[in-house]
Amino acid sequence: MTDHPRPDPIQADSDAHSEHHRIPEPEIRHPNPAGVRRVAVLTSGGDAPGMNAAIRAVVRTGAQQGIEVVGVRRGFSGLHRGEFRLLGPRDVANTLQRGGTLLLTARSRTWRTPEGRAEGAAHLREWGVDGLIVIGGDGSFHGGYALQEEHDIPVIGVPGTIDNDLYGTDHTIGYFTAVETALGAVDKLRDTGASHERIFVIEVMGRHAGHIALDVAVAGGAEEVFIPEDAKPVGTVVDIVRQSVSKGKLGSIIIVAEGYPGGAQGVADAIAQGTGLETRVSILGHIQRGGSPVSSDRILASRLGEAAVYALMDGKRGVMVGRTSGLFTYTPLPETWQKSKDVSHDLYRCAKTLSI
């Protein structure tokens, strides 16, 4: 009798069920009904961690789709001066983890004039650009939308701002990293505050929105948080600090968004005058904009950069790509600054509940 090799049960099972376990190949080619052949990308306004990941996504998605990508240096300032260069996949290698923006950013008074925007439009036409992707906040979207309305150049916005204050997306690029940066500082200051039995009033970014302040307050165990959306009397903090001291707390952390009337200094003055306790103010400032982006910002920026290219290919214009409840959304640019994005009232309640 001839021996026949027995099948490897693991291999046999793998073969039998391979269709159930195989990950389907992604669809790389995207329809291009708009006939897009070349797009431009710029970053504008305040820099935000993850902007480089978005630029990288735009460039590499373009390369996959046979679309050339033109990088515009120094935002709208460089656009009206014609500071352009073609970008390929290797030009954005090793940029995913870098903070800031490799394209640089700048404010531009000239772009606020019709003449400045006309110069920029002329440069885009000279380079044969079919659409412009603007990575930035509401001011940047104002500039891009004006260009589209006056010169009929399609513009797609990608939300890049640490403040997380743009309507039409759950989160903006840079927000997650800014929260982590601020939280790291709060943790260190709490150690010092407890050692010296001091009260630290810490100001985080957020001129018009308290998203960063709320997240940091909950994650950092703050005793109180002040945000622009709730201009409660600054004197309310006095009773809270007194209660903390009566409960034996060695130090207290108060979080203030920069847009709260009076800012951190106003809150600190109220505490000092109302309790006589030693109080210190720490303004974190622009440190929240720097540093390597955390994974959530890298992923969000990569998804939105890819989606922005697809939006132009689909013929969309004058919209911001966002992610809401896990789905891509396309919000008309004017709505991103005309409609208000409220803070989470549940999170605000949670901050108060857990501050005892």
Image (spheres, grey):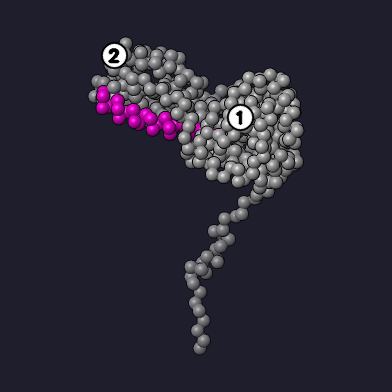
Left or right: 122, with 248 as reference point: right
- Residue 123 disc label: none
Residue depicted at 44% across the width and 31% down the height? 179
Residue 108 position in % (x across, y down): 62, 22
Residue labelled with disc 1: 74
Residue 307 position in % (x across, y down): 63, 39
Q: Main secondary structure of the magenta part?
A: helix
Residue labelled with disc 2: 275
Residue depicted at 56% across the width and 37% down the height? 52
Question: How many marks overall?
Answer: 2
Q: What residue span does the magenta drawing correspond to? A: 173-197
Is 182 a magenta residue? yes
Residue 24 position in % (x across, y down): 60, 55
In the image, what residue type sits under mark 1?
Arg
Of 267 and 248, the residue lying toward us: 267
Residue 331 visible, this orientation? no
Residue depicted at 45% across the width and 17% down the height? 260
Q: Quadrant of residue 328?
A: top right
The residue carrying pointer 2 sits among few (fewer than 14), some (14 to 19) or many (20 or more) residues within 10 Å by Cα, namely some
Is 322 a magenta residue? no
* Quarter containing the C terminus: top left
Left or right: 277, with 75 as reference point: left
Residue depicted at 51% across the width and 67% down the height? 13
342, above or below 22, in the image: above
Left or right: 255, with 144 as reference point: left
Q: Tell me the SS state at disc 1.
A: loop
C-alpha span from label 1 to label 2: 49 Å
Residue 85 visible, this orientation? yes
Q: Quadrant of residue 221?
A: top left
The residue carrying pointer 1 sits among few (fewer than 14), some (14 to 19) or many (20 or more) residues within 10 Å by Cα, namely many
